[in-house]
Image (cartoon, rainbow, N blue to C red):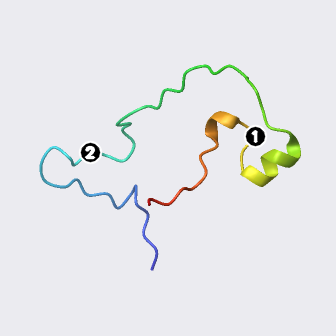
């Protein structure tokens, strides 16, 4: 039998027992400038279009 998390909600003990409708935090993303990009072929090989997001795996020596 399935339960509905909102209608079956029971507040827990202590200060954490908040209803699920309350927002606890909001994300903030600053404006970003569109900079240099990889070519489509290079981006597919590296997994990202943006050089600033490219971090290849390097095992520790």
Q: Is residue 32 left or right of residue 4?
A: right
Determine the residue positioned at 19% across, 55% down: 12
The vertical placement of 48 against 2, above or below, is above
Q: Secondary structure at mark 1?
A: loop
Which comes sooner in the sequence, label 1 or label 2? 2
Q: Residues within 10 Å of mark 1 (few under 14, many from 20)?
A: some
For disc 2, the marked residue is 18
User: Which callout, 1 or 2, points to the residue nearer the camera?
Assistant: 1
Q: Secondary structure at mark 2?
A: loop
Q: Residues within 10 Å of mark 2 (few under 14, many from 20)?
A: some
Q: Is residue 4 left or right of residue 42?
A: left
Q: Residue furthest front?
A: 61
Which quadrant would the N terminus be assigned to in this image? bottom left
The vertical placement of 26 against 56, above or below, is above
Determine the residue positioned at 72% across, 51% down: 47
Which quadrant would the C terminus be assigned to in this image? bottom left
Quadrant in the picture for residue 33: top right
Q: Is residue 32 left or right of residue 40?
A: left
Q: Residue furthest left?
A: 14
Q: Position of residue 60 (x, y in %)?
A: 44, 59
For disc 1, the marked residue is 49
Closer to us: 36 or 59: 59
Q: Position of residue 40 (x, y in %)?
A: 87, 43
Closer to us: 43 or 13: 43
Determine the residue positioned at 49% across, 26% down: 28
Quadrant in the picture for residue 22: top left
The residues tagged by marks 1 and 2 sit, at their Cα atoms, a distance apart of: 41 Å
Quadrant in the picture for residue 35: top right
Q: Position of residue 5 (x, y in %)?
A: 40, 60
């Amino acid at each position: 039998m399935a339960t509905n998390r909102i209608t079956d909600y029971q507040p827990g003990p202590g200060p954490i027992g908040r209803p699920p409708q309350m927002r606890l935090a909001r994300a903030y993303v600053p404006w970003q400038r569109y900079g240099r990009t990889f070519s489509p072929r290079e981006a597919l090989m590296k997994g990202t279009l943006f050089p600033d997001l490219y971090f290849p795996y390097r095992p520790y020596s």
